[in-house]
Image: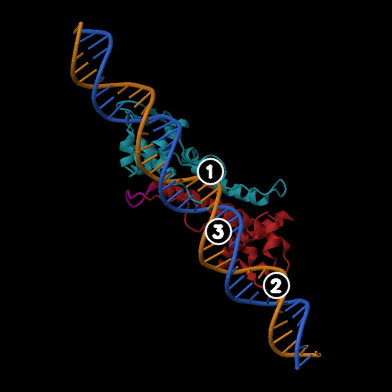
Chain colours: A cyan, B red, C blue, D orange
Amino acid sequence: MKYSKATNYALHTMLNLAMSNSSKPIGVQTLAEQQNVSPTYLSKILTKLVKEGMVSSVSGANGGYSLTKGWESISFLDIIFAIEGKSSLFECGLDHGPHCQIQKVMLESEEKMEEELRRQTLAGLVQTSK
Amino acid sequence: MKYSKATNYALHTMLNLAMSNSSKPIGVQTLAEQQNVSPTYLSKILTKLVKEGMVSSVSGANGGYSLTKGWESISFLDIIFAIEGKSSLFECGLDHGPHCQIQKVMLESEEKMEEELRRQTLAGLVQTSK
DNA sequence: GGAACTGTACTCGGATACTATGTGTCCGAGTAGTTCTGG
DNA sequence: CCAGAACTACTCGGACACATAGTATCCGAGTACAGTTCC
């Protein structure tokens, strides 16, 4: 079990967007260069973030991506959920009664991690990265 | 990102072994039937647990698997690490300076989850499952 | 001078290919009890 | 009766096959801006 590289790219891209805070959108090429990813792949990741409403895209010349209003409150968990999906990490597929104790424990531990990720916002990260 | 099915099988098998608490080893066939897995696949999972010293195996007739001494203190994390490996969930492969803030945040959140999983022991689970 | 045309620099999204990993099966080898056989 | 051989029920571990998901590329389409042409 590991986070996908896409999640890593997404987090870094969001940070880059937040740090640059220009009013103009930033092209996918620029963003891709900063991480040594192919632009086309990064654009696929970005469309997921757009669909979640964290990022807006502008087509055409001088186009690119920029953060939407209220980005300061976007948490790590939001970004991770956008890329990895919202389903829980552990699912006991066995049909041995309705309440699987193991499932319960796993879910609780997962919740602890998500709590922490919910506390960490983009804005907070920008603060410490300056 | 998801836990593998193998982890699920491992957790349930450990619970089964702990619940049965017979002095004689239990055959892999019996264990497999309880979860609708193929015996050969389950044996692969069990060998990982054997290598970590949580389970001992007895060959030959009337052979099988049984928990080792001190099993009461085995935690969920121990079992998960045995199957999934001990490496951390997130690794920022980018070479943008020595201390990646994102990596730091991710590691901290992961630590919260592991803390919880370390607290949950097999013995505790048996208690609530009776 | 202004409307239409052209070029350019972008994003968007589907199709496709490659790769890694998880999942599962097969089979030969080794091991330890159990039963059978022969003296 | 008893020692040794044959049998049987297991685990062990490597090799292999398959499915799925992640990673990455390619390309045609759409879009908006800037410059050019032409009346």
Instruction: Give neighbour class at mark 1: few <14, some 14-19, many 20+ (Cα, 10 Å).
Output: some
Q: CA separation, marks 3 and 2?
A: 27 Å
Name the residue carrying label 2: B61
Q: Are marks 1 and 3 on the same chain?
A: no
Name the residue carrying label 1: A115
> Regarding mark 1 in the picture, which secondary structure is present there?
helix
Q: What residue type is labelled 1?
A: Glu
Judging from the image, mark 1 belongs to the subunit labelled A
Q: CA separation, marks 1 and 3?
A: 25 Å
Highlighted range, magenta: B94-100
**Which residue appears at 72% of the width and 65% of the height?**
B21
**Which residue appears at 47% of the width and 40% of the height?**
A83
The location of residue B65, given as percent across then percent down, is 66, 67
Instruction: Give neighbour class at mark 2: few <14, some 14-19, many 20+ (Cα, 10 Å).
Output: few
Image: B46 above or below A120: below
**Which residue appears at 68% of the width and 70% of the height?**
B63
